[in-house]
Image (cartoon, rainbow, N blue to C red):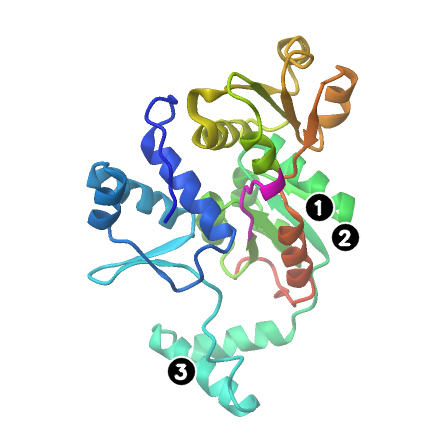
Amino acid sequence: MDIVLNRRGGVPVKDQLVAQLELKILGGSFVPGERLPSVRALARRLEVHANTVSAAYQDLESAGHVELRRGAGVFVRGGPPAALPEARGLDEMIRLALSAAFRQGHTGVEIKAAVERWLKAAPPERVVVVDPSPEMADLVAHEVRSVLPIPVAGCGLLDLAREPGLLSGALALTLPYHATAVARHVPGAAVQVIHLEFPQKDREAVLDLPPGSTILVVSHSPTVLPFASVLLRTLRGDEVLVETRLAKSPKEWRRLVPAADLVFADALAVGAVKKARPRRLREFRVLTQPALRRLQDVLSVVVPRGDGRG
């Protein structure tokens, strides 16, 4: 496992470990179901305290990337079990699904009600981006709206708590940290978890910079900036200077743009940043092309209708 920790870059070791493991999981370096090194083994390999590795694994579990199985280890989360797609015929597929539902403690009445609800389902009419930060919701909604011919709106968790019907007939998009809250407010809602990813070409652009370079990140969303800072410092440590600024504060970033060796700007900020004449500009997307393809696949699947309350 090629993980490099920079102990002089100012970024906590745990955050570096979480960022690198998350990128490896999202990038396919670890396959669903694969067992990761134990806490003690990884701590010895990286020469860090076991509590640091344990905390990193807990963060990854909260984000939905891994599953901590007591006495068994840490495993990469995957999609649904392969048993159903491999079933021989519809009857066996239904039998396997019913067996799985009964094993999890659901009653026959609950299963029947759920099946009837899904039989009345239809493809999503719209997408709702759910995030506590309005700026983050706006950014993701803008990216989805620019490539997919479907109505897209954003809403906060408090909005959802007050009006669960906002997700009726919709596919909810949210970061892994908020998926549990969405499910709690609207049981049975169709939810697609999205992840902040960093494409390989952008990583290569950062790694190719000579020591002493300055990287500037300008984003509409305050959620993006800490992620970018941790990731960039994990990649290069104190070899480069990383500056992050919110797009809504142009006085703070306009003077930095011409001097920066590499500027990253999101889809809502890139137009304004271009006017400041950066020497080298890369537009980054919260949703990468693979993520958008996954979203297109999900939008072709039915979602339950009803009042959105489960």
Distance in Å between CA atoms under marks 3 and 2:
36 Å
Stretch of the chain drawn in magenta:
193-201
Q: On the image, numbered disc 1 is attached to which residue?
A: 144
Find numbered disc 2 in the image and state the secondary structure of the residue it sits on.
loop
Q: Tell me which residue sits at (44%, 46%) in the image.
A: 22
Marks 3 and 1 in Cβ contact (< 8 Å): no
Q: Nearer the viewer, residue 30 or 139?
A: 30
Is residue 92 placed above or below 34 in the rendered structure?
A: below
Q: On the image, numbered disc 2 is attached to which residue?
A: 150
Closer to the eye: label 2 or 1:
1
Distance in Å between CA atoms under marks 3 and 1:
37 Å
Residue 99 is labelled as: 3
User: In the picture provided, is 82 more to the left or to the right than 56?
Assistant: right
User: In the picture provided, is 91 more to the left or to the right than 54?
Assistant: right
Q: Tell me which residue sits at (53%, 35%) in the image.
A: 132
Q: Tell me which residue sits at (62%, 40%) in the image.
A: 201
